[in-house]
Amino acid sequence: MRVGFFQFSPIFGSPAKNLKLIRESVKKTDSPDILVLPELALTGYTFEDSEEAYSLSEEVGGKLTGELVSIARENRLTMAVGFLEREGKHLYNSSILVNGEGVVGVYRKVHLFREEKSIFKGGNTGFPVFEVNNIKVGLLVCFDWIFPEAMRTLALKGADIILHSANLVLTYYQKAAITRAVENRVFIVLANRTGIEARFGSRNEFTGESEIVDPAGKVILKAGKEEEGIFSIDINPEEARDKKVTDLNDIFEDRKPEFYENWG
């Protein structure tokens, strides 16, 4: 299976232009089986307030969703895309998983970062696992990374690959992802964005350096901070089903939940 990420700088407030860029970029690339895009990839990130965000949002199943499904169908791939989701009066910072047949699933970001708390409602989907080409995948969005329970939950549910859409401004996760991959024995596909958004006195400089990490903690593909484009690599997802770190140690079989008093 070939997996990849699209690292780029979305144009703020222009879903149509971002969709055009995505479509053109995917078309001229040998498409991977699974492609991960950054957080809020269609809209940009630095909203003035919830009203502005609401004006750029859409319900799952709307026009933007249809365009993403069309891109997936034309290129025979599955995409995890950071998506500004509307449900009634509520906004969610979501990741939508689509293929050529439609929407495979949606994950709503559980752990909101900084000003996101005044714009979005905390996710209520839990941490679902979806099946893509007989492979189990889990979705995360950006700041979810700092809570080890998030990825551990997905791993315990059988996820082979974590599709992680992000707009990272802190500098820790690219290194921390190595630990997350090792402690869960999973592949991580991190799609971060590039560029700077400075609006209404708020300035976000994004760290780029999207990467793919294997279950042994090896960074097998990495982009630069300002590098843009689609990057992909072949992996064997079955490697994530071997949870042994030594002949006598299996990270799941050796767990002792009865002693994890502060876990839940």
Image (spheres, rainbow, N blue to C red):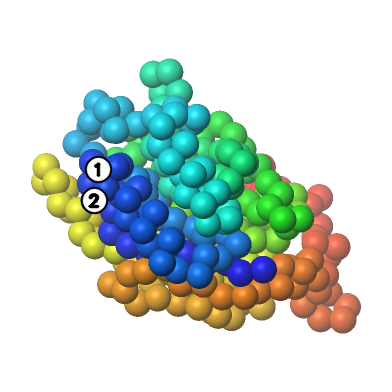
Relative image position of residue 108 (x, y in whole percent)? 51, 38
In this rendering, the answer to whether 225 lies above or below 145 is below
* Image-based side of 146 in relation to 234, left or right: left
For the point 80% across and 62% down, which residue is it? 252
**Disc 2: which residue:** 11
Local crowd at mark 2 within 10 Å, few (<14), some, or many (≥20)?
A: some
Give the SS element for disc 2.
Answer: loop
Asked whether 152 or 125 is in front, the reply is: 125
Three-letter code, disc 1: Ser
Percent position (x, y) of residue 205? Answer: 23, 61
| Quadrant of the rendering where the C terminus is positioned | top right
Left or right of residue 243, residue 39 in this image: left
* Residue in the picture at 27% in, 47% down: 17
Quadrant hosting residue 16: top left
Vertical placement of residue 24 versus 94, above or below = below
Mark 1 Cα within 10 Å, few/some/many (few <14, many 20+)?
few
The single residue placed furthest to the front in the displayed view is 74
Q: In screen coordinates, is 204 left or right of 26? A: left
The tag on residue 169 is: none
Up the image or down, 6 lies above or below 182; here it is above
- Indicate the amino acid at tag 2: Ile
For the question of whether residue 240 can be seen, the reply is yes
Q: Residue furthest top?
A: 88
Residue found 51% across the figure and 43% down from its top: 69
Residue contact at pointers 1 and 2, CB within 8 angstroms: yes
